[in-house]
Amino acid sequence: MTDSANTRTRKFALTEGGPTFRIERRLKLVRENSPLIVRRAFFSIALTWLPLLVCSMLQGFAFGKDIPVPFVRDFAVHARFLLAVPLLFCVEAILGPHLAHAASHFVDSGLVLEEDFARFDAAIESGLKWRDSPIAEAILAVLAYVLTAVNLLSLAVRVSTWYALRTDSSFSLTWAGWWFVVFCVPLFQFLVLRWLWRLFIWGQFLWRMNKLSLQLTPTHPDEAGGLGFVGEAQRFFGGILFACSISVAGVLANSVVYDKVPLINYAPSIIAYVIVAVGIIMLPMGIFVGTLLKTKRRGLYQYGTLATSYTTRFHKKWIVGPESSEEPLLGTGDIQSLADLGNSFQLIEKMNAVPISPRTPIHLALACLIPMAPLLLTVMPLKDLIRLLLKVAL
């Protein structure tokens, strides 16, 4: 086979392109082979959280007791702009290389035949073209502002906060509130939507891979025909879920602390959120269901035929007519071969319909739930929570 390194036109760098990425490069927030994670994190904080703090201080809404919810006591704003937004930028340095390596592994592992190299390259180019589309990011930006406007119009401000002052019939935005609505919230919405767009592009690439004549092996030890590496890469989307869940936890904390809504009331919503979030991340894995089931059925028939032939000969040689065999039973390789054949057949029976291990959805669910663990402090003392965690760990 031709050296795979010479067949790929470009690596599938899903996070290293697009209009906003080029802006980051001009601002020297990204360098070649150097994502500058710390710099990007601090820059995002300087554009969002810091102006909100300064504007709130100038109007006396940061620490003062004149309003029920000053800036420093708003859990949601700190969770979203001190943690979630920086994480949505920084996770690119982790997830991007893993997806690029997984894409390359289709060729490096021999799953893609040389005759399909041109189609593989076309899939890479198509994905990168969508990644770099200015129209796509413009649509995402518009959607971000639409979602922000919808949230603002549906917002029921019961009391005055650092970003909105309640009046008898309506509310008015503060200086910080205007920056919050015009820039900060749309930025967060845009980053989340951009990750959903990247997930779609990744799914589109996998769909194209599924259309190739992939050389899947039913006895592969990953129990996914050789596609287990795809599910392993998908697990790193947990970083996105972790960042989004931090924001969700901040909103819930405000509701529990200030609106006095019992945390248990949100249990169904939290469960639904975890199921939907994990389901969205796992959705691209469903692309391979038909192919893997077909590979499994074919393997069961092929290895079943082989097993029938081998076990019949083994039975005739060692059971029906052992006296006719001059080969001693002790030390023969026939028994080991029989055991190996049985192990191969068991691997096929265990083959999954999706290329993921059971721990992958568990990891993704934990990424959703761990940021919400501090909310338990609203219903139990810290020492009781630590004691509970220790019992679970042990």
Image (tube, rainbow, N blue to C red):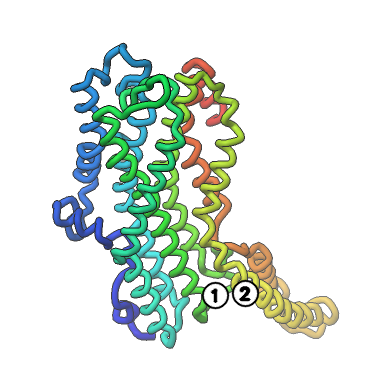
Numbered tag placed on residue 69 in the rendering:
none
- Badge 1 crowding class, 10 Å Cα cut-off, few under 14, some 14 to 19, many 20 or more, is some
Q: Amino acid at mark 2?
A: Thr
Vertical comparison of 295 with 363: above or below:
below
Q: Quadrant of the C terminus?
A: top right
In the picture, residue 14 is in which quadrant? bottom left
In the picture, residue 26 is in which quadrant? bottom left
Vertical comparison of 61 with 150: above or below:
above
Q: Amino acid at mark 1?
A: Leu
From the image, tell me which residue sits under label 1: 216
Give the farthest residue toward the right: 320
Nearer to us in this view, 135 or 198: 135
Residue 333 at least partly seen: no
Question: Under tag 1, what secondary structure?
Answer: loop
From the image, tell me which residue sits under label 2: 295
Residue 315 horizontal/vertical position (percent): 80, 78
Q: Determine contact: label 2, label 1, CB under 8 Å.
A: yes
Query: Mark 2 or mark 1, which has the lower sequence index?
Result: 1
* Residue drawn where x is 30% and y is 35% of the image: 180
* Residue drawn where x is 30% and y is 48% of the image: 89
Residue 66 horizontal/vertical position (percent): 31, 12
- Badge 2 crowding class, 10 Å Cα cut-off, few under 14, some 14 to 19, many 20 or more, is many
